[in-house]
Image (tube, rainbow, N blue to C red):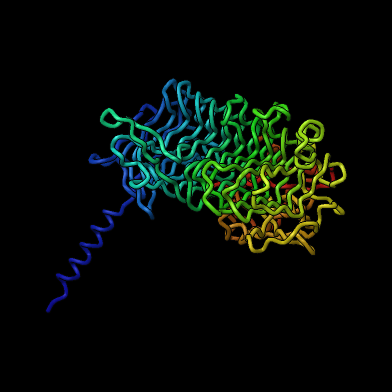
């Protein structure tokens, strides 16, 4: 029997599949305000939606669905997409899944989507059963309320209540938040225990949906009116890491005051964050428990509040029983807390069990004199770690209490460089915590160097680390400088070299130095950093495929 018909059918099938799987590029002019999927399909899995550069009022995206292995990508094109609007949102996604919105369209521009001002609402909302989304390299600035909202509030359809909907796989990274009226980020419902809606004329209690696999990483948040980051109802496998939060909660709104709020129903590890200033507590744990808070730096929390006012106490870290699961545990490890207005760590959870507070450094808590002179039932040292009830199950081990940092041999506290100098009394003073799998410090260097773990978020390490291009591109995380760094950074290229440009910024974002690399090179190229003062910087690496950031210590001869 001839095989020609069969071959013809196979070729036809392959052609049909190729046409069906073809990815389309869509170019959206700045005058277009509404993109709709549904029956009139606008984009399909794997498509790229190019938002043309220029000023636009707002953008609503509705019923757009990628797939698990082929997201739909929204990206700026030919420059910056600038949004300045009197609308109640800058960008909104409703009933959208498996999508990414990114401002990486131009490698030389940090935030290619710039939500400059929203006079009557939020910078971006992702809701109405939206899920499986990524948000990166976007500026959210000058919003009346929050910068970024991701949640789907329950309504009378009951399609987004807890038994009907789970919001999954949210990745928020490398964004800039400035001067947001309420929270920088509001992720998940704060009404974990239920909220009342009107149904057929009756008040009905419903439970909002939960979240799973939420990662909030490497964002910068400045001057949020309320919490810098609020994550609530995220009950499964989530984390908040590597963020910089400065001067949050400046509106002083009660119960809306923290750098990071681990809200009701949340089970998320919180690590490697730097929180500076702000009227509220540095980190508030009101979640389920069963989580770790480690390697964080918290400086001047609750800056405007009097230590002795019980209604205005603000702490470095506060743990309470808002939604604690019975017998869950908190592990508060290797944090550095400086000048909290009230207590360093205030732990009030009776529901949790087998809690551990270890290897933390706490300096100059404001409540010390208050407890010493006014509140007789507490010892003055309780201000460093306040355990509010004798029935609380918690061990405190290897924590260091000081009134100033002068003899701790930090590199330079004036620029928030809390890495350790040789002979620091913090070296080898901690307890090992291998069972908790905390193997890295604040800069993702090995946690155990020497005989024991060091106290606080940094591990002292005199060895230089040699990093090759293959090392850089074999990791899913950020590239790290050697720590301590040499006075110049050298690169030796080959045919696979992908780095285009390297820039060094201050922690506030001011460009200090830039180095352009040839598209292909084989000789060693050096970047002289000897003129920089030792301190924490933001390092940006631009490749021909994209860009990466990392906050990093650069250590030079200039102290």
Q: Is residue 546 at least partly visible in the picture?
A: yes
On the rendered structure, is 282 left or right of 80? right
Q: Residue furthest left?
A: 1
Front-lying residue, 29 or 96 = 96
- Residue 414, percent across and down? 79, 36
Front-lying residue, 253 or 213 = 253
Counting the numbered discs, the total is: 0
- Residue 303, percent across and down? 71, 29
Front-lying residue, 366 or 278 = 366
Q: Quadrant of the C terminus?
A: top right
The residue sitting at 76% across, 39% down in the picture is: 378
The residue sitting at 57% across, 46% down in the picture is: 240
The residue sitting at 61% across, 35% down in the picture is: 258
On the rendered structure, is 518 left or right of 533? left
Q: Is residue 503 at least partly visible in the picture?
A: no
- Residue 529, percent across and down? 76, 45
Is residue 460 positioned above or below 234 on the image? below
- Residue 442, percent across and down? 68, 50
Q: Residue furthest bottom?
A: 1
On the rendered structure, is 2 left or right of 515? left
Q: Quadrant of the N terminus?
A: bottom left
Is residue 39 positioned above or below 255 on the image? below
């Amino acid at each position: 029997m001839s095989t020609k018909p069969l071959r013809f059918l196979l070729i036809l099938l392959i052609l049909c599949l190729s046409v069906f799987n073809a990815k389309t590029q869509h170019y959206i002019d700045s005058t277009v305000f509404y993109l709709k999927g549904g029956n009139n399909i606008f984009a399909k899995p794997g498509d790229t939606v190019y938002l043309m550069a220029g000023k636009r009022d707002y953008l609503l995206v509705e019923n757009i669905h990628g797939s698990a292995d082929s997201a739909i990508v929204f990206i700026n094109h030919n420059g910056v997409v600038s949004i300045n609007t009197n609308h109640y949102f800058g960008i909104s996604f409703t009933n959208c899944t498996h999508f990414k919105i990114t401002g990486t369209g131009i490698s030389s521009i940090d935030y290619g989507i710039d939500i400059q001002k929203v006079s009557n609402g939020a910078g971006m909302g992702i809701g109405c059963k939206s899920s499986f989304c990524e948000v990166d390299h976007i500026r959210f600035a000058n919003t009346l309320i929050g910068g970024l909202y991701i949640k789907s509030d329950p309504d009378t359809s009951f399609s987004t209540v807890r038994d009907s909907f789970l919001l999954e796989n949210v990745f928020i990274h490398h964004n800039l938040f400035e001067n947001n009226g309420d929270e920088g980020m509001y992720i998940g419902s704060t009404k974990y225990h239920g909220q009342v809606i009107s149904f057929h004329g009756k008040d009905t209690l419903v439970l909002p949906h939960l979240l799973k696999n939420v990662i909030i990483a490497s964002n910068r948040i400045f001057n949020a009116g309320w919490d810098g980051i609020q994550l609530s109802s995220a009950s499964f496998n989530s984390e908040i890491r590597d963020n910089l939060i400065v001067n949050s909660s400046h509106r002083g709104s009660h119960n809306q005051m923290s750098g990071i709020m681990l809200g009701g129903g949340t089970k998320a590890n919180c690590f490697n964050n730097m929180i500076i200033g702000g009227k509220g507590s540095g980190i508030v744990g009101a979640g389920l428990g069963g989580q770790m808070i480690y390697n964080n730096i918290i400086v001047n929390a609750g800056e405007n509040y009097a230590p002795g006012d019980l209604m205005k106490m603000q702490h470095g870290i506060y743990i309470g029983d808002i939604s604690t699961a019975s017998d869950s545990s908190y592990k508060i490890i290797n944090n550095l807390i400086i000048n909290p207005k009230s207590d360093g760590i205030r732990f009030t959870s009776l529901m949790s069990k087998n809690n551990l507070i270890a290897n933390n450094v706490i300096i100059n808590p404001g409540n010390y004199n208050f407890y010493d002179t006014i509140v007789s039932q507490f010892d003055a040292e309780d201000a460093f770690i306040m355990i509010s009830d004798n029935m609380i199950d918690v061990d405190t081990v290897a924590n260091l209490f000081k009134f100033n940092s002068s003899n701790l041999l930090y590199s330079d506290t004036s620029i928030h460089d809390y890495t350790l100098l040789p002979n620091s009394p913090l070296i080898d003073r901690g307890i090992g915590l291998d069972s908790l799998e905390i193997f890295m410090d604040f800069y993702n260097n090995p946690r155990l160097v020497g005989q024991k773990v060091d106290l606080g978020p940094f591990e002292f390490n005199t060895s230089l680390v040699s990093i090759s291009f293959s090392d850089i591109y074999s990791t899913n995380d950020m590239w790290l400088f050697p720590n301590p760094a040499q006075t110049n950074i050298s690169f030796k290229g080959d045919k696979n070299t992908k780095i285009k440009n390297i820039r060094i910024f201050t922690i506030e974002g001011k460009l200090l130095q830039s180095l352009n690399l040839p598209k292909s090179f084989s000789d060693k190229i050096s970047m002289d950093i000897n003129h920089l003062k030792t301190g924490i910087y933001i390092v940006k690496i631009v490749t021909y495929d994209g860009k990466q950031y990392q906050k990093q210590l650069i250590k030079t001869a200039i102290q």
